[in-house]
Image: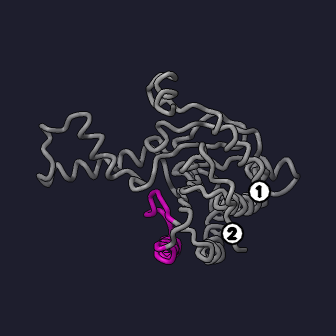
């Protein structure tokens, strides 16, 4: 399917970067008297539709929480199913994303995946690297605490190599150095973080990148989250005033 941009959708107030915690697949399957695997398959279909809709709305970056570092604790059978769905998505969906000029990226600890999947991720990124449309970031084996710790480790290695002076490591300098190594450092920060499934937490997702994000929680289970639901989140976001530490009066004066 070719994605035609919605020309009227790029209005003031749209977020540049949306992140989604896709929660509720298993509960959706249970509510519909289906096996748990059916929920994950339905969730993959829902993701495809949301990617298409976000691209039509001309969102710059869409980041989705596909598999957390904690998800390895799930039953072996469920993890195996998720890995098979991952392979299927790499085989079938990447070509479609490439056709629609969408760039694909992965963040997270890839070392825990089988070589087949690691190679598939590399191939997907290389295939789409020159695309200029929306960037789809897929977080796999990812955790926000791992991300910050990994970045801090890179800074420590620079200090050890004599490339950074530890005596000059002020709070501001450390933040500057850390930012260079954090996942998605070259992309805009998260503006809007959406969580489906009714829970009110971010579950160790994008702790650094979503520091000033607006949060939107919905009771909809992920397989039921569609384009209309995304539009409702965007409409809600457009009504919010983002102050970044300033007062309302300062924000209003800046935009006057």
**Which residue ends up furthest to the front in the rendered image?**
256
Q: Which mark is residue 122?
A: none
The residue sitting at 62% across, 60% down in the picture is: 79
**Coloration of the structure image:** one colour
Identify residue for label 2.
3
The residue sitting at 61% across, 66% down in the picture is: 83
The stretch in magenta equals 105-130
Q: Nearer the viewer, residue 89 or 68?
A: 89
Determine the secondary structure under disc 2.
loop
Q: Nearer the viewer, residue 54 or 210?
A: 54
Q: In the picture shown, does residue 106 fall above or below 21?
A: below
Identify residue for label 1.
39
Q: Position of residue 13 (x, y in %)?
A: 60, 42
The residue sitting at 26% across, 36% down in the picture is: 172
Q: Nearer the viewer, residue 202 or 13?
A: 13
> Pointers 2 and 1 in contact (CB under 8 A)?
no
**Which residue ends up furthest to the right in the rendered image?**
33
Q: Position of residue 156 (x, y in %)?
A: 23, 48
Determine the secondary structure under disc 1.
helix
| 89 lies left or right of 186 | right
> Taken as a whole, is the magenta stretch helix, strand or loop?
helix
Query: How far apart are the alpha carbons under marks 2 and 1?
Result: 26 Å
Q: Position of residue 31 (x, y in %)?
A: 85, 47
For mark 1, does the 10 Å Cα neighbourhood hold few (<14), some (14 to 19), or many (20 or more) residues?
Answer: many
Is residue 158 a member of the stretch shown in magenta? no
If you read the primary sequence from the N terminus, does the residue marked by circle 2 or circle 1 appear first? 2
| 203 lies left or right of 30 | left
| 31 lies left or right of 107 | right
The residue sitting at 52% across, 27% down in the picture is: 252
Q: Nearer the viewer, mark 2 or mark 1?
A: 2
């Amino acid at each position: 399917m070719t994605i035609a941009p919605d020309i009227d959708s790029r209005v003031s107030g749209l977020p540049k970067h949306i992140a989604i915690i896709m929660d509720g697949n298993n509960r959706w399957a249970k509510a519909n008297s289906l096996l748990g695997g059916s929920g994950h398959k339905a969730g993959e279909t829902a993701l495809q539709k949301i990617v298409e809709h976000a691209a039509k709305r001309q969102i710059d970056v869409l980041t989705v929480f596909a598999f957390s570092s904690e998800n390895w604790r799930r039953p072996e059978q469920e993890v195996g199913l998720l890995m098979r769905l991952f392979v299927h998505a790499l085989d079938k969906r990447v070509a479609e994303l490439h056709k629609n000029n969408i760039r694909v990226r992965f963040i997270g600890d890839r070392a825990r995946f089988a070589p087949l999947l690691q190679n598939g991720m590399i191939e997907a990124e290389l295939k789409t690297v020159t695309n200029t449309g929306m960037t789809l970031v897929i977080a796999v084996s990812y955790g926000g605490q791992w991300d910050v710790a990994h970045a801090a480790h890179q800074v420590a290695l620079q200090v050890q190599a004599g490339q950074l002076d530890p005596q000059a490591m002020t709070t501001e300098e450390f933040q500057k150095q850390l930012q260079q190594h954090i996942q998605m450092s070259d992309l805009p920060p998260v503006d809007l973080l959406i969580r489906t499934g009714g829970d009110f937490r971010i579950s160790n997702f994008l702790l650094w990148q979503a520091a000033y994000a607006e949060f939107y929680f919905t009771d909809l289970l992920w397989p039921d989250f569609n384009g209309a639901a995304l539009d409702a989140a965007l409409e809600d976001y457009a009504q919010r005033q983002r102050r970044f530490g300033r007062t309302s009066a300062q924000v209003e004066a800046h935009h006057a």
